[in-house]
Amino acid sequence: MTNDPFTAAASLDELLTRTQQALSSMRSRATEHADVDPEQLLRAEGSAADGRVRAVAVQGGRIQSVVVEPELAEAGWAAVCGHVVVAVNAALADLDAQVNSSARADVDALAARLGGLQEQSVRQMELFSRAMEDVLARLNRSGDAGTRTGRSG
């Protein structure tokens, strides 16, 4: 590392930029994009009626599929619809748990990065402060030398 104040400030700026990029990346992962391959999204399954109704939910709170085994139709539409609601809600609850778990992991990663940023920024500010003290000392020495030689300052 250097005592050059401009280098220290640039390093601190770089750290802040990297942290902002990490935050931006985390935000973009949390948002569903139309051009994303569905296989890359978080997905969850729910079922009802002993597995005769199955639903798949994907990241973004969307239902990817619902499958109802034909023999369940004998129970009547009201019963089938009730089972579909149970299966879909189970899939969405599982998806919500996965998203929350993923968000906690992202927050933990960000906290670790910010901890490192704080430590590094303290070191950078110490270097910057020392460099500024050196500049002031040089200016004072230069001013003292000019006074001794009769130059006005």
Image (tube, helix red, strand yellow):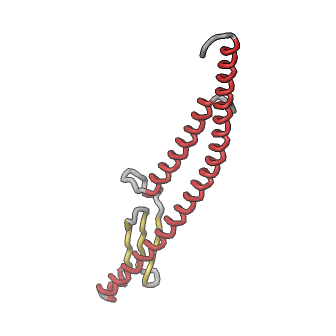
> On screen, 2 above or below 77?
above
Residue at horizontal 68%, vertical 34%? 130
**Residue 38's x, y, as percent?**
42, 57
Residue 108: image x %, image y %?
Answer: 59, 59
The N terminus lies in quadrant? top right
Q: Residue at x 47, y 69 (%)?
A: 96
The residue located at (46%, 59%) in the rendering is 41
For this view, does 30 lie left or right of residue 113? left
Using the image, determine if residue 100 lies above or below residue 86: above
* Residue 79 to residue 87: above or below: below
Q: Residue furthest left?
A: 77
Q: Is residue 24 left or right of residue 124?
A: left
Q: Nearer the viewer, residue 152 or 95?
A: 152
Compared to residue 82, the image places residue 118 above or below, namely above
x, y percentage for residue 2? 68, 30
| 26 sits to left or right of 119 | left
Tell me where residue 78 sits by quadrant.
bottom left
Q: Nearer the viewer, residue 87 or 12?
A: 12
Number of numbered discs on residues: 0
| Residue 65, image x, y percentages | 38, 68
For image coordinates 39% across by 53% down, the residue present is 33
User: Foreground: 61 or 120?
Assistant: 120
